Each structure stands twice: as C-alpha cells, then as structure tokens.
Image (tube, grey):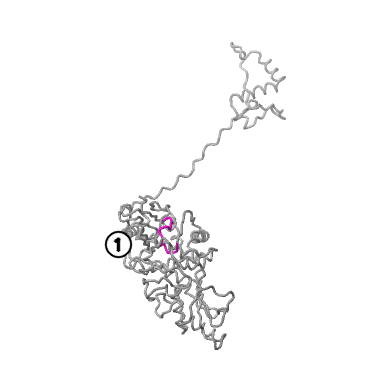
Amino acid sequence: MTEPDDRPTTPQQGPRADGEGADATGLRAAFAKHRVAWITAASVAAFALLGSGALAAGASVGSGTPEAAPTPTATVTVEPPRAVPTAAPAPATLRTCSVAELAADSRLANFQGQVRNTETGEVLFDRKGDDPERTGSVLKVLTAASALAALGPDYRIPTRVVQGDRPGQIVLVGGGDPTISAVSNSFYEGAPKLSDLAAQALAAYQAANPGQPITELVLDATLWNPDDNYDESWDADQRTIGYSSLVTALQVDGDRQNPSVGTSPRSTDPVGRAGQAFADALGVPNATITRAAAPENAAVLGEVFSQPVSTLIGQMELTSDNTLAEQLARLVSLDAGGDGSFASLTQTIPRVLADTYGIPTDGMVIRDGSGLSEFNRVPPSYVAQLMVKVLNGENGLGVVYDALPVSGQTGTLASRFTGPNAVARGAINAKTGWIDTAYTLAGIVHAEDGSTLSFAFYAVGDGVQDSARQALDNLATGVWRCGANLAAN
C-alpha cells in the first residue's frame, strides 16, 4: 500500500474558480516549513480512514532519513476465541438381532443378565446387570478364580500323620483335602490314597518306637473351627441327598457313603468316618480314637498330597462339586488372613478377587464357596466381566475356562441344548447353577458369526421352576445366533 509521501506529483493547472488551487505557492511554502506537522496530520487522517491495518503494516514517513512520528494509541478489542468443532463421533453400529422375547420368558421369573463382546468389551445386552443377586453354583467360578489367585495352580493340599505326645499315640492331621480316598476307585481320579499314608506312618512309627504298638489315634481337624461346618441357609437335605458334606478339614472321599459316585449320602460325622477308615488302613481297627490338636513341632511320620489346585478346579466345575468348592474357599480365607470360617469369606474372597483381577467387587456378598446359599449376592455384570478374563486366560484363568462344561457335550451341560437348541451344541462353555430360588448360567458363547461373547444369566424368584433351565438354554442359543449383531433391546 502506498503511503501519502510516496504518491507521485502532477503539474498544477492554475487557480480554480472554487479556490481549491489558489495560493499554491503559499501552500508549498507552508508545507516545506511545517513538513512534520503536515505529515503527522496526514498520518492521523490515514489512520482514521484505513483503520488499524495501516498501522500494522508500518508507515515510512518522508524521504532520506525519516523522522520518528508519534504512534497513535489505539484501543484493541480482543474477541474471545471461537469454539473449535470437535471431530464428529463415529456412527454407532446398528445392531438388529433381538433376544428380547426370549429374555421375557415367564419361566425365567425375575430375570437378570448381561452379554458382552469379549473383543471390544462393549455391553451388547443388559437386564439389571449391575444388581447383585444370588448366583447358585455360578459362584464356583469366583471360588476357582480366588483359589488360583491365593493358592496358585500348583498348590497341593497336605494330609499328614505326626507323632503323638505319649507312647502308642499318633495324630492324623487334616489339611482341608476332601479327596483323599479309602478306596481304589475313587470318584476323584488321581486322589491320594489313605493306604499310602498309613504305610508311611506305620513304617516311620515302628522305626521310632520299636516294640510299641499303636494304641491311640488322635484326629486333628482344627485347621478351622470344626463346629463351623454347615451354613444355616443351606437346606439340610443337601447333605442327606448327597450333594454336599459337612465342611471339615479332615474327611475322606468327600464323606460319601459310596466313594465312587458323585452324588451319595454324606454322614453327620466326616471326621469320625475318616478316623475309622485310617485305623483300618493301619491295621489297628480297635485303637482308641480321640480328637485334639496335634502337638506343636511333632515329628512327621507320613504325608500325602492332593492333586494340584488346577486339577481340583477342573473336578469341581465339571460336576459342580459343592464339597470341593467349600474346602477351597476355606483355604483361600486362611491364606488371605482369615480364620477359615463361613463369616470370613465375605471379606477375604472379594478382596482377593479385586486385588488380582481388577474388577470392582462393590456390593458383592460371599456367604459360601459353592453358591448353595440364597444369601450370596454377585451382579451378573461382574460375572460377565470375569468371564472375559477367563476366556483370555489372564492371571492363569485359562484353568477355569478349560474346566467349564460344554453345551450338549460335557459335565452338567452334557444332557442340555437339545431340540432346536442343538445348533449351539459344542459352542457354549458355561457354568450352571441351581438352588431352590434361582437357576443360573454363565460363560462364553462362540457365536455363529464367529464373534465371542461373555454372558451371565440369572432366573431368580421364589416360584422359579426347573423349566427355567430350558428357557436359559433358549436364551443362550439366541445369543449364539445373533453374535455381534445382538441388539440391546
């Protein structure tokens, strides 16, 4: 832009009638005499006409060595910055496959559930998924996860014999292993044998006490309080029918009347039954049997160990073994600083789970290890999140996944997923659950479209019936058909 003093001059044309050209010589003289003042005036006029843009460009005043001109002070109004538009959100995937009708089946009573995409973590379907509720045997997945975290997959539960505090006395010390067996064909494949323990103990005792027969057998079941052995919320017929034993640190064959089958009536005194079986194995069936804690620092005469925790979890989940679940829960409590009581489980198991797997356990109530109590409270959302980690094998949880029953093929799901649901046979790995007021199912769906989903479904209510199992299978098969296209509604 050309500033005033840089404009080219033109010849004067003489005076004009309107006087605009009059006294041109005087004007030139005045200009020459007061050049700075004229320039200043011109600059101010230009500033007024051209605005702040001229000042920004900078004025060059005069020719030769310019004189500094006063700089007008302008009041500049700073406008607030305009909001910068954010990037448009990616369009949400419109999922169109619905299981809403299946979830509304009246056989499901008060239904709660959640389904997650295991790859993205997205919640695809939810019905009161964050509300804590009773779980049935689905709780065994949490017990297994806590046992892996606290005890480790390779831990083996000991059962030992130690020297008593007087001649002729030995002590059988229970370590919480319910699988040690008095028979050759135990329900628990690979279980340690009472006969092996007896052979070790007898040989060591005779070497240490030559000529002194064993006359007294002491039974030590004090790893936790022996009287704290059955939760008041459990139905008494769980024991007499044969689904669970009293929870004692010393027992053999899960205290089954028939050690070779899963469901068999249990006794009212598993510690006494174990003691008599051991006396028989020692060859002293008429020895006096008493109960007390073993002497401190007593010499060990014999010791056998359970299968690893990883194997026990497989046996527990596949057949939903309540006795194994309760024993493992007590051992978790003790390892986590509890006293092995029922009451301690509410504090110890959620803490172990939260510390190890990072999923909040707020609102969770753990009353037992098996899920038999209707007072257990775990949200379906927690189980669905844990199942993602189970699928991915995080923190050793692959052991839990490998142990889950498979739809229509193994364990407690072997006889399910029939008829129209047979299309999902072999595609769902899940833990079943049942108590009088709840039927549950939770696990992993390998869907028809190739996606993988985790889920937890609870059918809860005082009037819920066995037909809820069929409704749960229908719903799980519906999720299998929908896959990643599963709609929220």
* Quarter of the figure with residue 59: top right
The magenta stretch spans which residues? 368-380
Instruction: Indicate the position of residue 79 as horizontal and vertical percent values.
Output: 56, 33
Whether residue 317 sits left or right of residue 349 in the image: it is: left
Q: Residue furthest left?
A: 419
Disc 1 crowd, CA 10 A, few/some/many (<14, 14-19, 20+): some
Q: Residue furthest bottom?
A: 211
Instruction: Name the residue nearer the viewer: 452 or 209.
Output: 209
Q: Secondary structure at mark 1?
A: helix
The N terminus - image quarter: top right
* Magenta-colored stretch includes residue 394: no
Whether residue 3 sits left or right of residue 397 in the image: it is: right
The amino acid type of the residue labelled 1 equals Asn
| Residue found at x 47% / y 62% | 342
Instruction: Indicate the position of residue 123 as horizontal and vertical percent values.
Output: 41, 53
Instruction: Name the residue nearer the viewer: 453 or 161.
Output: 161
> Residue 337: in sight, yes or no?
yes
Q: Is residue 422 above or below residue 254?
A: above
Instruction: Indicate the position of residue 109 as horizontal and vertical percent values.
Output: 33, 54
Q: Is residue 444 above or below residue 259?
A: above
* Magenta-colored stretch includes residue 374: yes
| Residue found at x 53% / y 64% | 339
Whether residue 407 sits left or right of residue 300 in the image: it is: left
Q: Which residue is mark 1?
A: 421
Instruction: Indicate the position of residue 295 as horizontal and vertical percent values.
Output: 57, 75
Instruction: Name the residue nearer the viewer: 240 or 427.
Output: 240
* Quarter of the figure with residue 449: bottom left
> Predominant secondary structure in magenta?
loop
- Number of numbered discs: 1
> Residue 156: in sight, yes or no?
no
Instruction: Name the residue nearer the viewer: 152 or 346.
Output: 346
